[in-house]
């Protein structure tokens, strides 16, 4: 070890003094980098480019004229009925003041790059020899489809509480927890091999998880922010898309190595050339393709999983596209347009728009749901209802027409259905006591028949693979997943975790869209690769 | 004698039932306390103590002290200041009954 010189000793002394002595704000600002504080505490929700993501944009423009004192109170105490946590005790008062000053003087950054080389450099290998992993689950489970994964955000969107938590949906016991560093957002399962799950975080990191030994084996960062992710039907490819920057990437699902990136840009429905956030990305049992929504460009791209990954662009789908679900063996894609308040039906074989259907107000279909009732396939779509039309849309997916708009108590975000469960569950998200509740729509009468008071901010309902249990996240300030009997609607269990959000049943790989029966699908569509024979 | 005892017990039960409401406590806790303290547990990453399962009398005394500022904390003095006697009793009863 080197002997400290007089100079370094002096620096050390100055540093200790800086920590010990009460200092003026000016002197303290030099002690931390406010942009780094923003990136380390705020950016996973508010966007690395200061342009907003799950949470509002924080920049000189959006915060113009806002009182620094009022902003400081929000940062310290959190914001009620949102995911904004209290930073009291986590950041010092000087740090909070420094970040606010920084935000009020920083413009939105122009699409900060994250290249294929950045992705390659971020690849981490936690288990180098996967052949040494156990050959079967290291815990008791009848069928891997009984695994339910919960994206636990963690109260601060990062840290100890941020995990993918896996539960046996027959016993309601946790079977594994995989720390993800920042908030887990999406969990997908490999349709070809039941042992692999993929977890994507709000900071665009993807973890390849071995469900048998319940650990991450590899991870890669694919951008700054963005939840979009899909897995191909053969389980060989993953496609991931980002809000920041505006790109998408195809990865080798085995090694997570990036194969090709795509710049997301195009002409929007109003004729303007725009750079675009990535919306949903979906693999389909219908073909070796991915479909990706370009939110701002209003386009859906179909990417063939062949040499060079060629792209077919479907334009003028709708303004501000977001999420989607599949029907008809995965040949048809139902995609929501926030600003046009429609859901567009797209034929992935012909690669064209079939029809645009009315969809309430600011449709957010979540994972969507479809059920077969009296020979008809009915699709269910939720919507935020920001313009007071709080309905759940029901469409006949064979005829592609609106059957009914079912009035519900407020805005909704995600419908859950199961072939064996009598009700379609929707989460009420309106910002008051209603946010505690889930409403149940009878599949046959298409009326709301029951309201469950779950607690917290109840959202993302999901049925177990056998349809016997309904799982609901009591998120935000709530800290549990609550389990109900699907028929009696009695509460049967509670599983504790920090700020749970999306719930993803492993059964999804078999029924494609929640509510469809794998057997019906197999019979009707000649046997899907993902369907159990 | 027994009759008097029964009457006394009954009136005590009735009084307790009237004085505190778990449901009112739940609503108040969700609106005021859970942002920091969580419902069953606060965040592992935070500095806030767990309230679930704590002794009701302890919680009640602490909240009263924060409210009358005999116990100092910038943040708790201002939050407890918004609570009525009933709120404090209800919130304390609610958290005491929860399992962390």
Image: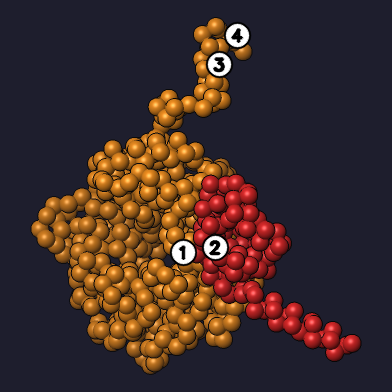
Chain colours: A orange, B red
Q: Chain of mark 1?
A: A
Q: CA distance from mark 3 to mark 1?
A: 49 Å
The quadrant in which residue A516 appears is bottom left
Q: Position of residue A353 (x, y in %)?
A: 19, 71
Taking the view exactly as shown, the residue that stands out farthest to the left is: A271
Image x and y of residue B85, in percent: 60, 66
Residues packed near mark 3 inside 10 Å, few (<14), some (14 to 19) or many (20 plus)? few
Quadrant of the image occupied by residue A106: top left
Please tell me which residue is depicted at 50% across the width and 79% down the height of the picture.
Answer: A452
Q: Nearer the viewer, mark 3 or mark 4?
A: 3
Quadrant of the snapshot with the N terminus of chain A: top right
The CA distance from mark 2 to mark 1 is: 34 Å
Q: Which percent across, then down, holds residue A140?
A: 67, 66
Counting residues from the start of the chain, the first of labels 3 and 4 encountered is: 4
- Which element is circle 1 on? strand
Q: Residue at 45%, 72% (x, y): give it.
A: A433
How far is disc 3 from disc 4 in space, using C-alphas? 15 Å
Q: Which residue is tagged 2?
A: B83
Residue that label 1 marks: A502
Give the letter of the chain under mark 3. Answer: A
- Helix, strand or loop at mark 4: loop
Q: Nearer the viewer, residue A129 or A189?
A: A189
Q: Are marks 3 and 1 in one subunit? A: yes
The residue positioned 58% from the left and 10% from the top of the image is A4
Q: Which residue is mark 4?
A: A3
């Amino acid at each position: 070890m080197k002997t400290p010189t007089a100079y370094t000793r002096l620096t050390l002394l100055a540093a200790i003094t800086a920590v010990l002595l009460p200092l003026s704000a000016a002197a303290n600002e030099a002690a931390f980098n406010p942009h780094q504080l923003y990136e380390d505490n705020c950016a996973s929700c508010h966007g690395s480019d200061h342009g907003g993501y799950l949470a509002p944009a924080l920049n000189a423009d959006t915060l113009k004229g806002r009182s620094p004192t009022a902003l400081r109170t929000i940062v310290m105490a959190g914001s009620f009925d949102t995911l904004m946590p209290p930073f009291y005790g986590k950041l010092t008062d000087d740090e909070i003041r420094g970040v606010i000053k920084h935000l009020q003087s920083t413009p939105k950054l122009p699409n900060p790059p994250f290249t294929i080389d950045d992705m390659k450099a971020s690849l981490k290998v936690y288990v180098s020899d996967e052949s040494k992993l156990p050959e079967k689950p290291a815990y008791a489970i009848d069928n891997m489809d009984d695994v339910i994964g919960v994206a636990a955000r963690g109260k601060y969107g990062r840290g100890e509480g941020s995990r993918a938590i896996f539960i046996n949906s027959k016993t309601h016991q946790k079977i594994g927890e995989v720390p993800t560093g920042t908030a887990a957002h999406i969990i997908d399962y490999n349709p070809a091999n039941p042992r692999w799950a993929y977890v994507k975080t709000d900071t665009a990191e993807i973890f390849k998880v071995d469900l048998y030994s319940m650990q991450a084996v590899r991870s890669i960062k694919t951008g700054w922010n963005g939840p979009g992710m899909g897995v191909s039907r053969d389980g060989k490819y993953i496609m991931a898309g980002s809000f920041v920057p505006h790109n998408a990437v195809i990865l080798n699902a085995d090694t997570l190595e990036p194969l090709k990136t795509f710049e997301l840009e195009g002409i929007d429905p109003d004729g303007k050339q725009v750079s675009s956030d990535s919306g949903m990305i979906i693999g389909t049992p219908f073909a070796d393709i991915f479909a990706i929504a370009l939110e701002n460009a209003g386009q859906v791209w179909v990417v063939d999983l062949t040499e060079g990954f060629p792209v077919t662009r479907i334009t003028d789908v709708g303004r501000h596209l977001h999420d989607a679900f599949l029907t008809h063996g995965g040949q048809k894609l139902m995609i929501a347009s926030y600003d046009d308040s429609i859901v567009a039906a797209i034929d992935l074989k012909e690669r064209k728009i079939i029809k645009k259907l009315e969809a309430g107000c600011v449709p957010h279909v979540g994972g969507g749901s479809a059920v077969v009732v009296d020979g008809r396939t009915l699709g269910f779509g939720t919507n935020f209802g920001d313009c007071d039309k709080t309905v759940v849309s029901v469409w006949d997916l064979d005829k592609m027409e609106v059957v009914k708009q079912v009035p519900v108590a407020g805005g909704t975000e995600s419908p859950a259905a199961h072939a064996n469960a009598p009700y379609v569950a929707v989460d009420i998200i309106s910002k008051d006591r209603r946010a505690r509740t889930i409403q149940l729509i009878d599949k046959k009468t298409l009326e709301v028949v029951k309201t469950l008071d779950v607690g917290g901010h109840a959202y993302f309902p999901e049925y177990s693979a056998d349809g016997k249990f309904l799982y609901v996240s009591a998120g935000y300030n709530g800290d549990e997943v609550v389990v109900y009997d699907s028929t009696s609607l009695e509460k049967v269990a509670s599983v504790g975790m920090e700020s749970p959000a999306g719930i993803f049943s492993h059964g999804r790989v078999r029924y494609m869209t929640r509510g469809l029966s794998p057997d019906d699908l197999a019979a009707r569509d000649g046997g899907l690769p993902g369907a159990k024979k | 004698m027994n009759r008097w005892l029964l009457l006394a017990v009954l009136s005590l039960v009735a009084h307790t039932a009237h004085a505190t409401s778990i449901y009112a406590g739940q609503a108040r806790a969700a609106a005021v306390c859970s942002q920091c303290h969580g419902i069953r547990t606060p965040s592992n990453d935070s500095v806030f103590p767990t309230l679930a399962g704590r002794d009701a009398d302890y919680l009640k005394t602490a909240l009263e002290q924060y409210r009358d500022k005999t116990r100092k904390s910038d943040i708790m003095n201002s939050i407890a200041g918004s609570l009525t006697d009933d709120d404090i009793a209800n919130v304390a009863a609610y958290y005491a009954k929860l399992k962390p």
